[in-house]
Image (cartoon, helix red, strand yellow):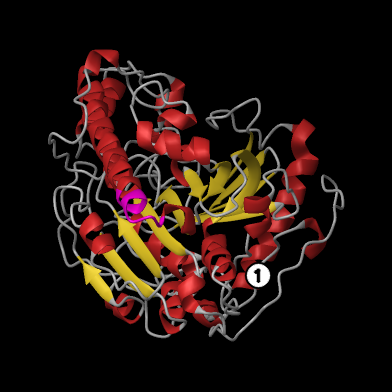
Amino acid sequence: MGMFCCNKLYSNDHLTNVVSDRDTIAKPNFIFFITDDIGWEDLGCYGSPNVKTPNIDRLAARGLKFENAYLTTSSCSPSRSSIITGRYPHNTGAPELHDPLPKGQVMFPQLLKQAGYYTVLSGKNHMGPQTKHAFDTISAGRGPGGEEDWNEIIRNRPKDQPFFFWFASHDAHRDWQMNDKAPVYNPDDIVVPPMLYDGPETREDLAAYYHEVSRADYYMGEIVKELKKQGILENTYIIFMSDNGRPFPRNKGRLYDSGIKTPFIVYGPDVDKGTTTALISSVDIAPTILHLTGNKIDDHMQGASFHPILQDKEWSDHRDFVFAEHNWHVFQAHERMVRYKDWVYIRNAFPERQNLLGESTRQFPAGRELWGAHEKKLTSPEQEDVFLVPREGEELYNLVSDPYQFNNLVSDKKHQESLDSLRKVMDQWIAETGDSVPKNPTPDRDDVNGKRLPGVWKKGEKAGASKQAESIKLKGPLRIQDL
């Protein structure tokens, strides 16, 4: 294909048996720390000028920090369901906000449990009742961020089993709750991201958000202390990530890097230290953890293990492509994204609609101030994305020259070859994974003020439903050789 050149082939076997014959006591432990709505740039180790995260920064310095880790969707529940199954949202049967995982979807902690791991989920679940099959214990967590029972869980675990703990904080999700576990930030000191209007309400909103980011960091520090105290830190993998971007306009829910990229840090036995630019997807997490535990990878999983990157941060034969999707999240939507090298291509099935989430309406302070500023003609073009009607049906960005994806190159003839190539890659992924545009999609639930629309609201057809995507095992193209 025009813009693509061949590289070394990387293949990942489709394996089905999940029971390992290793001695489970010798296996590594896992802390999987997933935060809520923390943007990938909003940590000190990722260059944030606003927030103090010394414990996460220390973990990154002693482990491996990923610069190009992508989620499959920037929406809470479908993102988590995608991670736990290793499948794309439209293949899980739960592609929209508040969709519970249906029966029959294989969850990797369930496979670990069957292989002798003690498995716990504490904090935010948001995946529905099927998770009871994957965990020995499920806790709602304690405290405003849900983290206050985590060290207790570590202390009270069975000592004759390896463990996998899915620790899911409510930090940093609206509405904000302040306490003494994190700094209180001065709104005057905030550097406002360029897609947001720089006003007092937005600064105060961001300052409260950063408080919750720092509270998650505090509990990371507490976890590490407890693991050290028990003498098990060196046999424990700690994985830190988020489920989607920051809960502000043109961030959460969207397929730009501000929404779909995640901070991703891995610390653990024999993990190479430093920073990697390798491309990974959140569907790769399940097969990677199964590989690290000596378990076979279920063939329903559409990701591929990135364990070679953990051993060698320069290893580059994992992925050429990552894919993501944006389905209903309070507002009707159907967008698809592919990244290849420095290029991002986005396709929108509903370009006649505003591209909104609750966080980009007048419901919350930053959104309310943005809408007010726009009415007064005080906003810059970079801040006006959520007001576009109609929108472009396709978007093409170069991340080197345009890291925030403000300059759509889809009409630039100089990049026609790149556009045509990525269109074909997207078409192949859609066809192989059984994606579809619903004919009767879920309608908007709220208005632009965050209020419920009148009448009876109910969910509509889901993406992939017409193609029986729940049962499809094909991955779509991971590398050039798959085209």
Q: Is residue 338 left or right of residue 71?
A: right
Residue at image point 44% right, 45% down? 254
- Considering the numbered disc 1 on the image, is that residue within a helix, a strand or a loop? helix
Residue at image point 49% right, 38% down? 60
Seen from the viewer's position, the closer of residues 351 and 335 is 335
Q: Amino acid at mark 1?
A: Ala
Q: Which residue is mark 1?
A: 431
Q: Exactly how many numbered labels are in the figure?
A: 1
Residue 231 falls inside the magenta stretch: yes
Give how far across and how far down residue 454 sits, in percent.
15, 58
Callout 1: few (<14), some (14-19), or many (20+) C-alpha neighbours within 10 Å?
Answer: some
- Quadrant of the image occupied by residue 246: top left
Q: Is residue 99 visible?
A: no
Q: What segment is highlighted magenta in the picture? A: 226-232
Residue at image point 52% right, 68% down? 86
Seen from the viewer's position, the closer of residues 70 and 250 is 70
Seen from the viewer's position, the closer of residues 106 and 420 is 106
Q: Is residue 155 left or right of residue 470?
A: left
On screen, residue 106 above or below 72 = below
Q: Is residue 150 left or right of residue 255?
A: left
Residue at image point 28% right, 14% down? 189
- Quadrant of the image occupied by residue 287: bottom right
Give how far across and how far down residue 317 sits, in percent.
75, 53
